[in-house]
Amino acid sequence: MNRALIGFCAFATAFGSAFVLPAQEESAEGEAKSEVAVEGLDPALVKAASAKPMAKHFHALVRLSLVSGEVLVKLPREKDFKPAVEGKFYPNGSSFRTVGGPTVFEFGKDAFLKVAGDAEFSTREEDFASPQRAVIPRRGSFTVSLPRTLPTGLFSVAFPNFVVKDLAGESSYELTPSGDGDEAVVHVITGMLALDGPHYKVLRMSAADRIRIRTTGDALFTSLRGEAGDYKVSLDQGCTTYKDPITGEVKKQDRRLDFSLTPQCAIKIFRKRSQVGGRMAVSVMTFDPAGEMRNRFTFAEGAASVNFGEEVVRIQDISFKTDKKKASDKKSAAGEKAPEGESAGESGGGESSSGSSESGGESSSNSNGFGDSF
């Protein structure tokens, strides 16, 4: 009995070794390949690159997966750029310059940054265990491709004057620096994203939405223009005060205006810091597709006493409604002299037409000067 048991154990040990040894050899070979892929970097980075990714959706490092032209890289805390090599991993916090054909950077299994032509950008330095990643454009055109199911808050694109966040799906970006600022274009191809800037927010942009943002170098002027789609821009309107009915305490309450940014609509934001007190004074104007001003308001940050605004009612709107009312009155007067049957038909049709026209104009999402307070 003992001999049979000893023989069985020996057979099992030999049988298992046949599978264990190739696995060990394969693991050693994989480690060697990883070491070659990150040659010249810190040994800690080599170890992190060869280990299993600690972040669920992204690699610990950024991989240069495709090069069609020339790519230069500057590692964190280094002063000079040097040639980058296709297939290597680079730490978060590195800066890249691309020249020529398209270049692809791999952040994760299904997360890519595609750079078209000449461009410059950097990645935000993160801890190896951090689940978040960010790209900081300097100039050029980029396309970000992420899983449609990526949770919010994990990937962002930090422009010099605003941040695109909560990305999912595919989106493209352009950044053109100028002598007095920069101009950026954000376009959602599939999926969604949000946008957060000084004194304005876009809570959600969906597929085919496109916006152009111009900012001066001192960030004292911002222009937003809709180029495609229909989405809400939440504009800061400063604050007001109200008295708590229970405690009687006077409290501050933020106010915002939701403006629908459709093609050719525009928003202009002017800022100036007060010489007395140092508060930022902000003036905002909104324009419809015809270029007519729809809203204007001014406020000082944190000062409820400096807060006023209005909806701009155009003269042609007033004359249009007046003409419609006069036409309706004439039809009603003519209906009284006409035969009974004709009077009912004309009077009913005139009132229905006028009512639907006026109610349609008043229901516009951009007709309220201050929007809903919340």
Image (cartoon, helix red, strand yellow):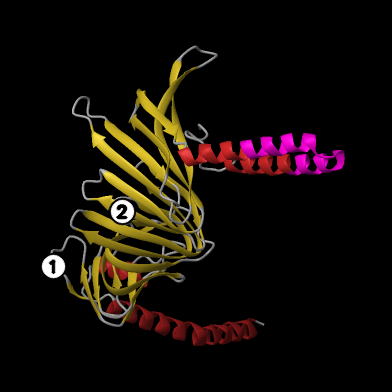
Image location of residue 57, percent across then percent down: 46, 63
Q: Residue at x 23, y 60 (%)?
A: 177
Q: Residues within 10 Å of mark 1 (few under 14, many from 20)?
A: few
Q: In the image, is residue 93 above or below residue 322?
A: below
Q: Let me know if residue 282 is in the magenta part.
A: no
Q: In the image, is residue 25 above or below residue 348?
A: below
Q: Residue at x 86, y 38 (%)?
A: 340
Q: Residue at x 37, y 51 (%)?
A: 224
Q: How many marks?
A: 2
The outermost residue toward the top is: 248
Comparing 160 with 290, the one in front is 290
Q: Quadrant of residue 54?
A: bottom left
* Residues under numbered marks 1 and 2 in contact, where contact means CB atoms less than 8 Å apart: no
Task: Inspect this view and state whether residue 164 appears.
Answer: yes
Q: Let me know if residue 334 is in the magenta part.
A: yes
Q: Amino acid at mark 2?
A: Arg
Comparing 201 with 26, the one in front is 201
Q: Amino acid at mark 1?
A: Asp
